Amino acid sequence: MAGLTWLLLPLLSSSLLMVSLFQSAQAAGIAVYWGQHGDEGSLADTCASGNYQFVNLAFLTTFGGGKTPVLNLAGHCDPPSGTCASLSAEIKGCQNRNIKVLLSLGGQIGNYGLTSADDAGQVANYLWNTFLGGQSGSRPLGDAVLDGIDFDIETGTGLYWDDLARALSRFSSQKKVYLSAAPQCPFPDGHLSTAIGTGLFDYVWIQFYNNGQCQYGANADNLIARWNQWTSVPSNQIFLGVPASADAAGSGGYIPPNVLTSQVLPSIKSSSPKYAGVMIWNKYFDRGYSSAIKGSV
């Protein structure tokens, strides 16, 4: 038996090392927003690039308060005429590559908001039946089942987003609904802090741009200070959100790829095991940025 043990130990150690290396290689990824520019390329090409592990379809710009929901995917398709159903095959293709595809709610400009916990429940039912695992006679993206919902809430109040998160998470008993949040970098976020505090969000990708007090400037000091605050929230996967070019963020925060990989990422990786990758705004402006950083993410 002793001889057999000596033979097994090297094999076991080698196997454990391979598992460890695999886990490390899979530990972080890149999320991107797609859908806000007709010239950003197709969803299929976005996923085929091999650069992303998450794609947020942006945006459902109108919902809540009894308003008829509006899906705005810029020049890609027209939901009322049914042309967005053609994205169904592309969404499934992305998922076949192990890329999670989420629908992003809100955005900087939109007509959205929740008026009560009951309203949040109604919106959750709509999202489940129209984009997730439920059933509806009207599914603008066809029969593809999205992986989850992204909260990019930038206007209105912070009320009832926690109720929406709870209502959506209850559907996970039927099919897992992944939840992500995209708060602004000032801590805590004025719109999503209560929702994130529920601990229901699988991913939190923080927008470290268009906010002078916490974005990258002359150096990364302010960014890192806020990052260390954000790692205290009850989510195990925290992402650094960055603009893909200087033009992608009108109020600043762009970090050149070489600076991101040599200065910023090493600091935030070492500060918390919750670091899970980088979120990029957005696909239209990503003209080499994700390719330049993916080896270091």
Image: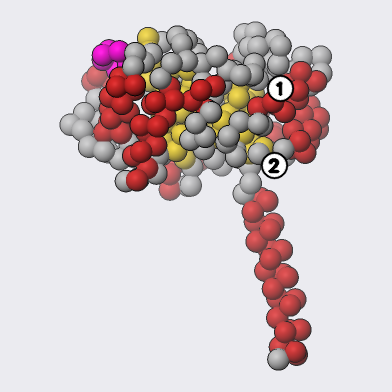
Based on the displayed image, in which of its 4 quarters is residue 58 positioned?
top left
Residue at x 45%, y 9% (from the top left corner): 156
10 Å neighbourhood of mark 1: few (<14), some, or many (≥20)? Answer: some
- Residue 280 x, y percent position in the rendering: 59, 27
Quadrant where the N terminus is found in the figure: bottom right
Q: Is 100 positioned to the left or the right of 278 in the image?
A: left
State the residue in front, 231 or 7: 231
State the residue in front, 167 or 68: 167
Quadrant where the C terminus is found in the figure: top right
- Residue 5 x, y percent position in the rendering: 72, 84
Q: Amino acid at mark 1?
A: Arg
Tell which circle, 1 or 2, labels the residue nearer the N-terminal end. 1
Which numbered dot is residue 273? 2
- Residue 92 seen anywhere in this rendered image of the structure: no
- Residue 221 x, y percent position in the rendering: 80, 20
Residue at x 51%, y 38% (from the top left corner): 202
Q: Amino acid at mark 2?
A: Pro
The relative height of residue 249 versus residue 138 in the rendered view (above or below) is above
Q: Secondary structure at mark 2?
A: loop
Residue at x 52%, y 28% (from the top left corner): 196
Q: Secondary structure at mark 1?
A: helix
Residue behind mark 1: 226
Q: Which residues are magenta?
A: 64-72
Does the magenta segment cover residue 283?
Answer: no
State the residue in front, 144 or 225: 225
- Residue 188 seen anywhere in this rendered image of the structure: yes
The relative height of residue 40 versus residue 237 in the rendered view (above or below) is above
Q: Name, please, the residue furthest toward the left.
A: 137
Cα distance in 3D space between marks 1 and 2:
16 Å
Residue at x 42%, y 29% (from the top left corner): 165
